[in-house]
Image (cartoon, helix red, strand yellow):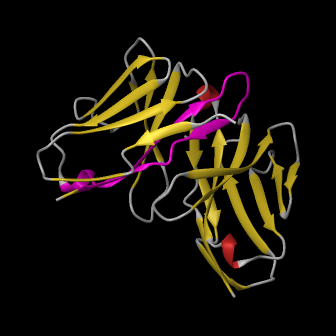
Amino acid sequence: KQEVTQIPAALSVPEGENLVLNCSFTDSAIYNLQWFRQDPGKGLTSLLLIQSSQREQTSGRLNASLDKSSGRSTLYIAASQPGDSATYLCAVEAAGNKLTFGGGTRVLVKP
Amino acid sequence: GAVVSQHPSWVICKSGTSVKIECRSLDFQATTMFWYRQFPKQSLMLMATSNEGSKATYEQGVEKDKFLINHASLTLSTLTVTSAHPEDSSFYICSAPGQGIEKLFFGSGTQLSVL
């Protein structure tokens, strides 16, 4: 059974610092890995999707890497802003579009 | 881009009542939709897979008689929480795969509070 773990569970940084969020998964037989943003009581916003054959994806200040063999992904957010405060979830996709989510990292960027 | 509409956004009900949540794919067809549940400070857990024209597939530990799923058309799936109790209070969210791509699109979620 796939298990996804995110470390740290919570993170508080001053504005301008870079954020590093970690995600690990136990079964490397995945189709892809996604990073999502979730604001309190709201749905999910997909940030980046990395196919299993890729090693990284970039979008603006966000960069995500994937090391499938070791079961790890890292999300980097450069020059953090207060608006980046949210919960970040990583999820791996197996057959049938089913996602297994990690527990999330709650990020607070202080102005 | 593809949009999944989910409503209501929030609902408060008395214990024992049934609550229906709708999930619609607005500009694409979805033969499959997924229902997730998220308890406070926990991650999302897949409850069931909704299949158009056939029975839903439930994950282990999810009561199919309590969480009724109907996928009557290619754009609509509904989740009915029957005889809701306070322990059913949770955030429910649906998702649907976009056609031709591997990306999943999520609804905005429904916060259910059972008194």
Drawn side of residue B80 relative to residue A101, left or right: left
- Give left or right: position of B64 versus B28: left
Span shown in magenta: B86-113
Question: Of B78 and A57, which appears nearest the observer?
Answer: B78
Residue A41, given in percent of the width and then of the height, sits at 45, 61
Q: Give percent across and percent down for residue B37.
A: 41, 47
Residue at position x 45%, y 48% from top? B109
Residue drawn 58% across the image and 55% down it = A102
Q: Quadrant of residue A37?
A: bottom right
Residue drawn 70% across and 47% down?
A: A34
Q: Residue at x 69, y 35 (%)?
A: B103
Q: Position of residue B61 (x, y in %)?
A: 33, 39
Check if residue B100 falls in the magenta segment. Answer: yes
Residue B6 appears in view: yes
Instruction: Give the side of residue A84 with respect to residue B24, left or right.
Output: right
Whether residue A2 is situated above or below residue B49 in the rendered picture: below
Q: Nearer the viewer, residue A6 or A46?
A: A46
Residue B50 occupies which quadrant of the picture?
A: top left
Does the stretch in magenta take in B1?
no
- Residue A71, position as x, y percentages in the image: 74, 50
In the current view of this chain or complex, which residue is farthest to the front?
B27
